Amino acid sequence: MIHRGSISLSQKHVKRFRAKLAAAGQGGSVEFTRSGSRAEAPGDTALLDVGEAAGVLMPSGCRMGICYGCVLPLAEGSVRDLRDGSVTTAGHESPVLIQTCINAAAGPCSLTV
Amino acid sequence: MTVMQKNPTSPIAHLTDADIEQLGKELDALRERVIDSRGQRDADYIRRLIDVQRFLELASRGVLLFSLFPPAWLVGTTGLSLSKILENMEIGHNVLHGQWDWMRDPAIHSTTWEWDNVTPADMWKHSHNELHHAYTNVLGKDNDLGYGIMRVDEDMRWSTFYLAQPLWNFINMLVFEYGIAAYDLEIGKVLKGRKDKGEFWGQAKRVLGKIRRNVTRDYVVHPALSGPSALTTLSANATANLVRNVWTHSVIMCGHFPSGVQTFSKSSIEGETRGQWYLRQMLGAANIDGGPLLHLLTGNLSFQIEHHLFPDLPSNRYQEIAPEVREIFQRYGLVYVSGPMAEQLAQAWWKVVRLSLPNPEPTTAVMAVGQGLAA
């Protein structure tokens, strides 16, 4: 059971630093399967930001990759860690849990939210 | 201690912005190396630990069925205390930090793990992972600085409430499991109207549910199963809970309250870079010296500094990277705060006692703000 963290009400007071680019990769189209939304995600933008910009209620926490409050299932596709460039890919019929605040789309993907 | 920004001799005065960024890169590289090397031996470690803890709990409760016999009471209570400590510290705290999420084991994952503690995992993750670890030791942001009931820094405004803070701390220590739950409920925020009452009551109901489950297990079912040993089993469970409370409270006090640990002003973290975040973690935590048993029983929070630098690295790795972290401290001219438990704990308690009184009147004019983290 995934806890839905509280939405940060004052985005302007959001955490100080954001993940620096390891290497800009291709982005992709992201599907938010439960809310039915879709968005084009650049390769340098955290999926958390992409989801929020698309009006999806995304769980979040520290927004800097240390609290695991933003974890969601990646049902399909691949994401790239903005900190070190490592790629995580969902297996067929085996979603993988990822942190959305430090991962960007690396090709088309879908998140269960 | 006041906030680092008001310290006339800043511990980071010798570091340039470039130094701090270089520090960040070195620590990032260290983190990457550990991540790349995670594997079977780490997975074996946590799985074995969980097996040991579960066996210890089962065996201890089994022995306590005969707790009327003093040796059984002693052995069972000791075992049960240790199992509760292991479950909360080395297992629960670390699993909930996401340290083992990389294994992709749905049974050992920060999103599914529920620990043997009356505070629900997700509520604790919010106050601890999200708030405490991001805002570590920032006055006005990190409520672990006093937990809302104590004044632990000269720059926290004094009021008569704090006169009794040694007593509040002592009571909190005895009932720490409940203290944490109350803290995670953010009761203060609710009273000030800064938290939605609906959300609060929903959380409170869940806390009460966990309390009911634990109380039923420890003080009703287990004693009932012990027949003639019912009362002694009850006292054994109460003792084990108390031992766990006192121990975990003491370990946690040693994390950020000993002398030499820095606090930081709210304004100093605006625009904070990764290097500066690392630096704040280095200066805002303290370690405990000891052997392997101490490290295990503190949930490796004896390596509070390493934990704060890398909260999501597997806890068994902290001891391995500690020498390298120490070396980095040395090279950057920073003080690595560490000491034996008795010393650290005494310093922490002394801070609680000393700051229960208002600050002595300053004898010189207020010094200009020293070099801050964000220039």
Image (cartoon, coloured by chain):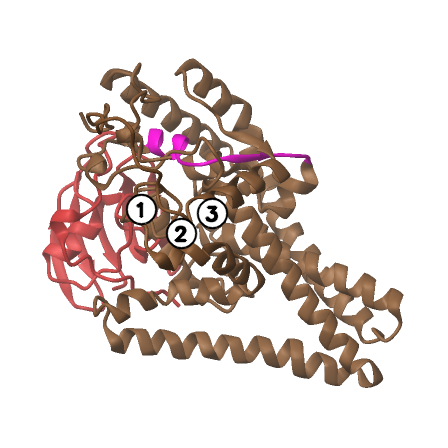
Residue A72: name its quadrant. bottom left
Sequence-first disc among 3 and 1: 1
Dot 1 falls on a residue whose secondary structure is loop
User: What is the CA distance from the residue labelled 2 to the residue labelled 1?
Assistant: 10 Å
In the rendered image, residues at marks 3 and 2 fall on the same chain: yes
Residue at mark 1: chain: B
Q: Residue A105 appears at what percent x and percent y?
A: 22, 46
Residue at numbered disc 3: B352
Q: Which residues are magenta?
A: B278-291
- Tell me if residue B281 is in the magenta stretch: yes
Q: In this picture, is B246 found above or below B14?
A: below
Q: Residue B15 appears at what percent x and percent y?
A: 30, 16
Residue B57 lies left or right of residue A64; in this view the side is: right
Quarter of the rendering occupied by the N terminus of chain B: top left
**Count of numbered tags:** 3
Residue at 53% x, 35% y is B287
Q: Count residues near mark 3 (Cα–Cα under 10 Å), then give few for <14, some for 14-19, many for 20+.
A: many
